[in-house]
Image: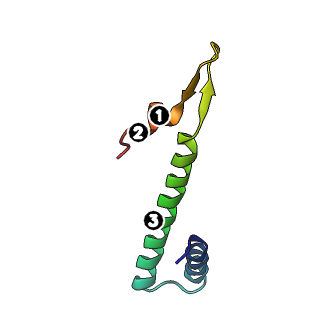
Amino acid sequence: MSMEDKIKRINELYHKSQAEGLTDEEKKEQAELRSEYVASVRANLRGQLNNISIQNEDGTVTNLGEKYGNKNLH
């Protein structure tokens, strides 16, 4: 299932929860989909941040991904 499909399903479950409520299976599915979505957003953001380089005043370039990105965040 693509991320776009997962987002559509998350939205469907949200609207159903507001209209009539969710079964226990649907609540579990919603929680799993949301967890996968959040993990995807974090991974994408981490990838973007790891590709940032800063030029210092002395002209040298510091790659923030090399400096900070390899640390274990878990």
Disc 1: CA contacts within 10 A as few (<14), some (14-19) or many (>=20) = few
In the drawing, what numbered circle is on residue 66?
1
Name the N-terminal-most of marks 1 and 3.
3
- x and y percent of residue 71 in the render? 38, 38
Q: Distance between the residues labelled 1 and 3?
A: 28 Å
| Residue at horizontal 40 percent and vertical 83 percent from the top | 24
The image shows residue 55 at horizontal and vertical percentages of: 63, 23
Determine the CA span between mark 2 and mark 3: 23 Å
| Amino acid type, mark 3 | Ser
Is residue 30 positioned above or below 47 on the image? below
| Residue occupied by mark 3 | 35
The tag earlier along the polypeptide, 2 or 3, is 3
Secondary structure under the numbered disc 2 in the rendered image = loop
Depth order, front residue of 58/9: 58
Image spot of residue 61 (x, y percent): 59, 24
Q: In this view, does 12 lie above or below 7?
A: below
Asked whether disc 2 touches disc 1, contact meaning CB atoms under 8 Å apart, the reply is yes
Residue at 49% x, 84% y: name it: 22
Report whether 28 appears left or right of 21. left
Q: What residue type is labelled 1?
A: Glu
- Tag 1 secondary structure: helix
- Which percent across, then down, holds residue 21? 52, 84
Pointer 3 local density, CA inside 10 Å: few below 14, some 14–19, many at least 20? few
Q: Which numbered circle lies on residue 26?
A: none
Marks 1, 3: nearer the viewer: 1
3D distance between C-alphas at marks 2 and 1: 7 Å
Q: How is the image coloured?
A: rainbow
Locate residue 32 relative to residue 52 in the image: left or right.
left
Query: Which residue lies under the disc numbered 2?
Result: 70
